[in-house]
Image: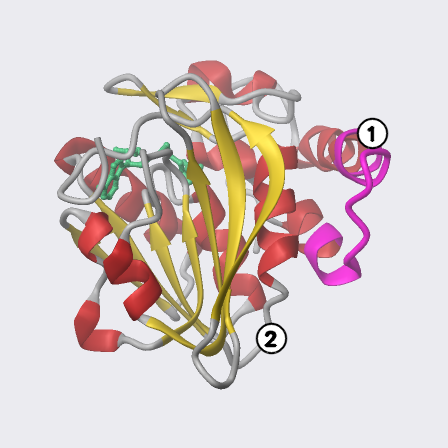
Amino acid sequence: MTDLPQKTGWNPDDYRIARRKMVELQLKKRGIRDARVLETMFRVPRHLFVDEAMAAQSYSDSPLPIGHGQTISQPYIVALMVEALNLKPSDKVLEIGSGSGYQTAILAALAGEVFGVERLEAIYQRGRENLQRLGSANIHLKLDDGTLGWPENSPYDAIVVAAGGPKVPQPLVDQLAPGGRLIVPVGPTEKSQQLTLVTKDPQGVISRTPLADCRFVALVGHHGW
Ligand code: SAH
């Protein structure tokens, strides 16, 4: 992927330096180890997924607003979730809450095909434009309630939910392939959630492992808030 020109006064080298620092200080220092994940986080230009006015902050250690009360996730949280998915280049991935498209681009670089679902139309359009500019061919997006999954293309080797709900949406568990991994923030309120790894073994047995405390925007939908 290449850096496109921006009006911040920063040149592509400045962005590359900021990304290198992000990888070293925010990801490696906090325990992200997977070399493919680290390399991809270094390559994908996060500044192209936020408003130009915020491009200079785009490698900071925090989520940033993308409009309509939503945020582009903090780089560390994206890396943590993507690393836990343990993606293979042939994997089919479902992403709920594709938002700006940033995490979608990371997933598309690491997996075979990515299906992204976003429920807010303005954000969906923006995410689609962002991803078209980068030209990833293996991304499919739809505007819908992602708590219902995307049954037509199931089963998925990996599913990631970028918004937090009261429980693990059952349709997502149903659409997970044997051997599949699902990462989803779950919690009793919108303010306190646990990033949860749900796995389905080759016999179809489901296990749940808590990964970290976290705070995501609300998963709004049939199986969400
Ligand atoms: N990965 C995105 C995160 C965006 S924030 C990024 O880094 O840009 C979470 C997104 O989830 C928001 O855009 C929100 O609109 C969306 N969302 C919330 N509930 C949803 C649902 N039921 N289906 C699909 N998207 C949903």
The image quadrant where one finds ligand 1 is top left
Residue 167 located left or right of residue 55? left
Residue 156 located left or right of residue 111? left
209 in relation to 200, above or below: above
- Give the residues in magenta: 23-38
Within 10 angstroms of label 1, few (less than 14), some, or many (20 or more) residues?
few
165 in relation to 80, above or below: above
* Front in this rendered view, residue 97 or 183: 183
Residue 19 located left or right of residue 56? right
Q: Is mark 1 within 8 Å of ligand 1?
A: no
Which amino acid type is shown beneath numbered disc 2? Lys
What SS does tag 2 mark?
Answer: loop
Within 10 angstroms of label 2, few (less than 14), some, or many (20 or more) residues?
few
Which amino acid type is shown beneath numbered disc 1? Leu
Q: Quadrant of residue 46?
A: top right
* Front in this rendered view, residue 123 or 216: 216
Residue at horizontal 48 percent and vertical 46 percent from the top: 103
212 in relation to 90, above or below: above
175 in relation to 49, above or below: below
Q: Earlier in the sequence, mark 2 or mark 1?
A: 1
> Label 2 vs label 1: CA separation?
26 Å
What SS does tag 1 mark?
Answer: helix
Picture coordinates of residue 21 (x, y %)?
80, 31
Instruction: Say which residue label 2 marks.
Output: 88
Picture coordinates of residue 221 (x, y %)?
16, 39
Picture coordinates of residue 50 (x, y %)?
43, 27
Residue 35 makes an appearance in the image: yes
Instruction: Say which residue label 1 marks.
Output: 25
**Magenta run includes residue 31:** yes
Picture coordinates of residue 85 (x, y %)?
58, 60
Residue at horizontal 37 percent and vertical 50 percent from the top: 131
